[in-house]
Amino acid sequence: MSKDSAVFGLDTSVVLRLLVGEPIHQAEAALRFVETEAAANRPCQVCDLVIAEAYFALHAHYQVPKSEALVALLSLLTSGQVEPTEQAVRSLRSALTASAKPGFVDRLIHEHYLPARLATFLKAAARLPTSQLLG
């Protein structure tokens, strides 16, 4: 595959610039890049680790409430400009429509392992289908 036809994966710094718009020059560059790649039928990929890290950064660093962070991430991932994993989209939707526990990242981990079962010591995570509480 030539360098010009390679698909890019976005790191957390790029995803955060797209979501928070700061610093402005980086946010604009990130948006131009993603839009250019999408227009060339090469949507940038966003892996689950980046999504989880962006979720925590939005909440902890930018003081974005968890529910708003989930909405912002889901909006970006379903925009058509990036290519997320199906597990991430399902986990975000599930976290938005369910009780607070288990949280988004626990749901993402659970989705990642499917169809395997999840072994956990967390009572909230054990509520997910195919999960087993240890101890």
Image: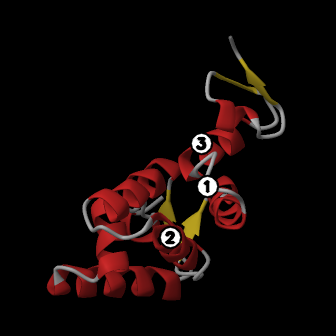
Q: Secondary structure at mark 2?
A: helix
Front tag of 2 and 1: 1
Q: Label 2 belongs to which residue? A: 73
Q: Earlier in the sequence, mark 3 or mark 2?
A: 2
Quarter of the image where the C terminus is located? top right
Number of callouts? 3
Q: Secondary structure at mark 3?
A: helix
In the shown orientation, is residue 71 left or right of residue 65?
right
Q: Position of residue 59 (x, y in %)?
A: 36, 62
> Which residue shows up at 46% across the image and 52% down it?
52
Q: Earlier in the sequence, mark 2 or mark 1?
A: 2
Q: What amino acid type is highlighted by mark number 3?
A: Asp
Q: Label 3 belongs to which residue? A: 106
Q: What amino acid type is highlighted by mark number 1?
A: Ala
Q: Position of residue 109 (x, y in %)?
A: 61, 40
* Label pair 2/1, CB-CB below 8 angstroms: no
Q: Residues within 10 Å of mark 3 (few under 14, many from 20)?
A: some
State the mark number for residue 100: 1
State the mark number for residue 22: none
Image quarter for residue 15?
bottom left
> Which residue shows up at 43% across the image and 87% down it?
35
> Which residue shows up at 29% across the image and 75% down it?
17
